[in-house]
Amino acid sequence: MCQQSTVPLLDHNIVFYGAGSMAEAIVRGMINRNVVASGKIVMLNRSSSERLAELRSRYGIVGTNDPAHKTEHLRTSPVIVLAMKPKDAAEALRELGQLLSPDQLVISVIAGLNIRTIQGLLGTKQPVVRTMPNTSSSIGLGATGLAFSKEVEEQSRRLALNIFEAVGTTTVIDEERMETLTGISGSGPAYIYYMMEAMIAAGIRGGLPLEQSTELTVQTVLGAARMVQQTGEEPAALRKKVTSPNGSTQAALEVLERGDFFETVIAAVNRCAERSREMGSALEKELS
Ligand SMILES: NC(=O)C1=CN([C@@H]2O[C@H](COP(=O)(O)OP(=O)(O)OC[C@H]3O[C@@H](n4cnc5c(N)ncnc54)[C@H](OP(=O)(O)O)[C@@H]3O)[C@@H](O)[C@H]2O)C=CC1
Ligand SMILES: O=C(O)[C@@H]1CCC=N1
């Protein structure tokens, strides 16, 4: 993980076009890690003024809905992060393309939307970085996959990596693997939270107070992730160390196996990847 720097990495504006959960997670992480001064972060959305007011007061960023200001920021910012939902992307990108000049870097966090479609909707051969971050970026523990269009020059490549390295780890991949990566790390936090919800519920049903059940679950998930990271051992090897022959863990794992846990998780990751492709195809159709 990156050390907190005393000098911000970015000394120019960065626009977040879309001001929802993912944009906030990255912004929060960037501010906490001093990647950029909060006054240089501009957050734009479609219509929610209350949301922008909340973000302005929470982070000291610039947030505006005023059409003239929005246009001005989009026209002049060297870096624009696309952070709206896939369903809203086509219209937004068509309008955005008319404002851009060739050197402005476009970074997308939109699931499924590929580089070719981004450039097609913009109507320009813009340098594009397609990324898939996750919401843990907000505490500096994100995992972001990145793929670059051929127009992205070394300096811009470095800049994009700097932004996401400051809020977690980065993995550069071939764009064709982005949907699989989405299935693992983009959506992955939700699977872990779901597992945690179930563990907490089981604790409560077994008579533990909510607070204790939550604390035990959180520490268990945290400890297990750290064990894999710090020991360098395979998860399967670590699992075996918990599992005494004919003991309680074995009995529990047998129940998970009966529910086809392993293959169910793989099927969930695959379905996530497939859904990302479906969303991408719907956007690709907007090109014709
Ligand atoms: N949430 C996550 O864990 C992750 C999300 N992503 C991707 O991030 C993107 C955003 O997701 P998320 O933050 O969860 O979504 P949210 O619904 O929380 O936020 C979407 C934002 O986009 C804005 N918006 C919609 N249309 C436009 C437009 N035409 N112009 C400008 N802004 C617009 C909305 O503004 P308003 O409220 O005013 O309509 C809102 O601020 C998605 O594409 C998703 O695939 C990627 C990785 C992880
Ligand atoms: O659910 C979604 O579509 C987004 C993409 C990855 C995480 N959330």
Image (cartoon, rainbow, N blue to C red):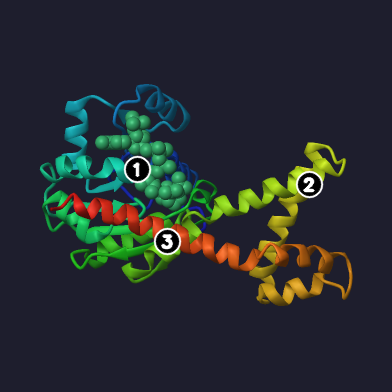
Q: Nearer the viewer, residue 108 or 35?
A: 108
Amino acid type of disc 3? Ala
Residue found 52% across the figure and 57% down from its top: 3
Q: Which mark is residue 273?
A: 3
- Disc 3 residue: CB within 8 Å of ligand 2: no
Q: Position of residue 13 (x, y in %)?
A: 28, 43
- Disc 1 residue: CB within 8 Å of ligand 1: yes
Is residue 59 in sight in this rendering?
yes
The CA distance from mark 1 to mark 2 is 34 Å
Is residue 17 shown left or right of residue 217?
left
Q: Nearer the viewer, residue 280 or 152?
A: 280
Which residue matches tag 2? 202
Image quadrant, ligand 1: top left
Amino acid type of disc 2? Ala
Which residue matches tag 1? 85
Q: Secondary structure at mark 3?
A: helix
